[in-house]
Amino acid sequence: MGFVDYEVKGQIAVMTINREKALNALNSQVLDDLNAVLDSVDTNAVRCLVLTGAGDKSFVAGADIGEMSTLTKAEGEAFGKKGNDVFRKIEAFPIPVIAAINGFALGGGCEISMSCDIRIASENAVFGQPEVGLGITPGFGGTQRLARLVGMGMAKQMIYTARNIKADEALRIGLVNQVVPAEELMATAEKMANTIAQNAPIAVRACKKAINDGMQTNIDDALVIEEKLFGSCFESYDQKEGMANFLRKKDDPAKVKHVEFKNE
Ligand code: DAK
């Protein structure tokens, strides 16, 4: 669809931002297309998403500077809301989303990667929040998500200096989970997505919600959130079969089998 390709591969799917000539920069159309593709995902069939950028140079080189350059205050606010709504949709998406970062992840590109659950970067990836050099603040959640991921001190350093960092430094500060050679990026991301897809989907979704919601509140309320989501897994086919399989294994290791979780 438009600037976003979508391919289902068994129980996982790959979403590719495809605006390679502009290094996959996010204009309003890309944001609308991302929104529409996310709305079209059949989350009963697909259990994990991978988000990447087209080409081998850039994941997303930020929000579209040409489009932003002439915005009025009101239009800037509307553009920020459009981006924030899409990024929040990714963050709260019922199934996990892995960012496969294949090059520049600057400004809105770094921000969209941070709205994903897990970040895997190629060795040529470059991260940064260059906004203060353009006379603006990060506008798609960068001031909030970066501080939550790498800590306040490092987030402030990156944002105030507008200095880009390479993949190895992003790994060192905890901005990405893993760095791999570029030619292995998609295979690594898809392998991780398939590993996630083989686990009980109801439980994986509940874990995502528990972590996301719990991180926004105090520990007492967070543990209540966990309790409720823990309870919600019981009486499902997946919980009964997952536990029965463990007990069968204990009883007789020869009875060990791969559980086909059913998302029910
Ligand atoms: N926007 C538009 N076009 C871009 C772009 C961008 N962010 N980044 C690259 N391009 C385009 C270039 O203009 C060029 O187009 P043509 O000239 O060929 O037509 C093409 O992509 C190739 O780029 P370069 O020729 O520059 O390629 P290089 O290899 O020389 O350099 C680069 C690659 C990534 C270092 C360079 O392109 C670059 O510095 N790009 C800009 C990176 C950047 O500053 N990104 C952050 C943008 S600010 C808000 C909501 C959100 C935001 C702010 C506010 N509100 C609340 C309203 C977010 C802001 C940002 O993301």
Image: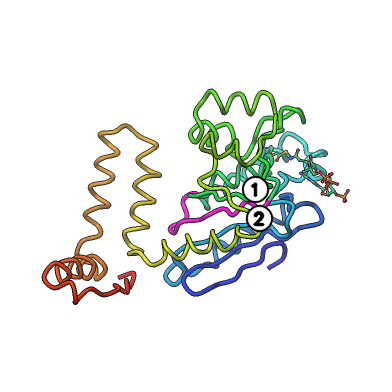
| Residue 95 magenta-highlighted | yes
Query: Quadrant of the rendered structure where residue 114 is?
Result: top right
Near mark 2 (Cα within 10 A), the count class, few <14, some 14-19 or many ≥20, is some
Residue situated in front as seen by the camera: 84 or 246: 246
Tell me which corner region of the image, top left, top right, bottom left or bottom right, holds residue 235: bottom left
The residue shown at (60%, 39%) is 168
Q: Amino acid at mark 1?
A: Glu
Give the residue at mark 2: 182
SS category of the residue bearing label 2: helix
Q: Is mark 1 within 8 Å of ligand 1?
A: no
Residue positioned 71% across, 38% down in the render: 76
Q: Nearer the viewer, residue 241 or 190?
A: 190
The residue segment tinted magenta is 91-102
Q: Secondary structure at mark 1?
A: loop
* Residue 78 visible in the picture: no
Q: CA distance from mark 2 to mark 1?
A: 6 Å
Residues at circles 2 and 1 in contact by the CB criterion of under 8 Å: yes
Q: Which mark is residue 123?
A: 1
Q: Which quadrant is the N terminus positioned in?
A: bottom right
Q: Is residue 94 left or right of residue 142?
A: left
Is label 2's Cβ within 8 Å of ligand 1?
A: no
Q: Report if residue 258 lies within the magenta region.
A: no
Q: Can you give x and y, in whole percent of width and height, for residue 51 in the image?
A: 59, 57
Indicate the position of residue 157 as horizontal and vertical percent values: 61, 24
Q: Can you give x and y, in whole percent of width and height, for residue 47 in the image?
A: 44, 65
Q: Residues within 10 Å of mark 1 (few under 14, many from 20)?
A: many
- Give the side of residue 38 with respect to residue 55, left or right: left
